[in-house]
Amino acid sequence: MGSTEVPNIFKAYDIRGLVGTELTPDFTFATGAAFARFIMQEREPGTVVIGEDMRTSSSPLADAFSAGVTSLGLDVIRIGLASTDMLYFASGKLNMPGAMFTASHNPAQYNGIKLCLSGAKPIGRESGLLAIENFVRSGSPISLGNVGKMSDQSLLSDYVKHLHTLVDVSGIRRLKIVIDAGNGMAGYTAPAIFDGLNVEIIPMYFELDGSFPNHEANPIDPKNLKDLQKAVKKHGADIGLAFDGDADRCFLVDETGATVNPSDLTSLIADRELKKHPGSSIIYNLISSRSVVEVIEENGGVALRSRVGHSYIKALMAQSGAIFGGEHSGHFYFKDFWRADSGALAALHVIAALGTSKDSLSKLLKPYQRYFSSGEINSKVKDVQKVMSIIEQKYGQLDSVTIDDLDGLTINGDTWWFNLRPSNTEPLLRLNVEAKTLARLEKITDEVLATVRK
């Protein structure tokens, strides 16, 4: 494949593009061969495990990728339909590099490839994607050796058993749970995960359909949670769960129909994990609530701050030995799940906590809700660096304010903070604000946005 024919769809953490124009069988064959070259260079095990989501394009693209891998003499194990965390499970359990065909929460016309090394070790731009892209652009040499073998293996029941060894949900009280799978992969995995538990499941949009006929499978957007919120109230459910398209992210709705801030779930899981592993380190990303740090420290843990993004969190977990990490985007990472993120595991944690408590979900989470949050607010700007410089000068002069640039610009006040960071892909600035009072939150948000949008 010549470099002029290679589309620019290698992103920071994965490959993602339009099916038929950018993501084609020729491209994925070349990428499979390039991935095989890369893992041979890295002295990785010589078998690649491959999973796919429910999009109609996933299976043919995975076929082409498999052919590319085997063309260089490596073997392939196809696990068929899978959530992304199920692919990570396969990579960890079998100790093999992996590829997952999914575009996560993107619309139907997109697809993508998430890659990892053996043991579910992440591959980001700096840790392999750039090398793989260069191999695709330069073309892989034709192998004169034997072509590798391809086999199929079902791992759904092994995946479910492993999840249940990590979270004990055997003794919970009867719970009524509404699950919105968004026509994504949770429609395949959730029935197996919740089978036999003391729960009544009310399924929504469990039919696997990559055209997403009901709503986008992107629960971080509040409009995609409206159906779930209504259903929770209508059925008098204890909790609502919403998964994204590849089911590696989980969002909650409480019994009143209110959405739950992902930082509250980070705090809840941190609290539980520190009871099992006292004194351990737990990672939070820098747009998580301050309450997360407070909860970790109150429970005797060590709070470690990370940049936004799974490759940063996974690298920090490996380096520090942290037992858990939570991101504000709904990704939750577990040391005993090969440091990978799993929406299902996060869901089981909250169900175990709720099912062993007499309290409702809103009451259970109340101790973690200590601040008011703006959510992420995006602004289009012409000169990102100039705007950030103006903001830094303006707030840097204030008393009792500290500034850091771990990821964008974070301004810390006494009872408030905000982070302003540029998008990786668009001329956007993303603003997150948190404060002790609603009045202070609104004041800071309005002030910063007035400067950013001027």
Image: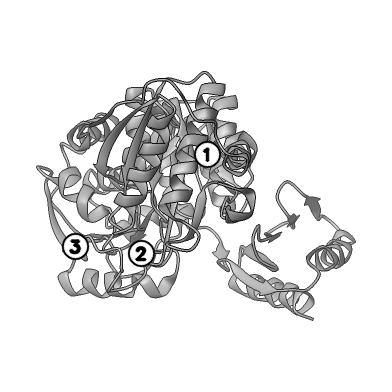
Q: Amino acid at mark 3?
A: Glu
Task: State which tag comes first along the sequence, 1 or 3.
Answer: 3
Q: Colour scheme of this structure image?
A: one colour
Is 210 above or below relative to 299? below
Task: State which tag comes first along the sequence, 1 or 2.
Answer: 2
Q: Nearer the viewer, mark 1 or mark 3?
A: 3
Give coordinates of residue 351: x percent, y percent.
Answer: 26, 47
Nearer to us in this view, 102 or 76: 76
Residue farthest along the front direction in this orientation: 144
**Residue 217: mark:** 2
Mark 3, secondary structure of its residue: loop
Task: State which tag comes first along the sequence, 3 or 2.
Answer: 3
Nearer to us in this view, 415 or 50: 50
Give coordinates of residue 193: x percent, y percent.
Answer: 19, 43
Residue to which mark 3 is pinned: 207
Residue to which mark 1 is pinned: 296
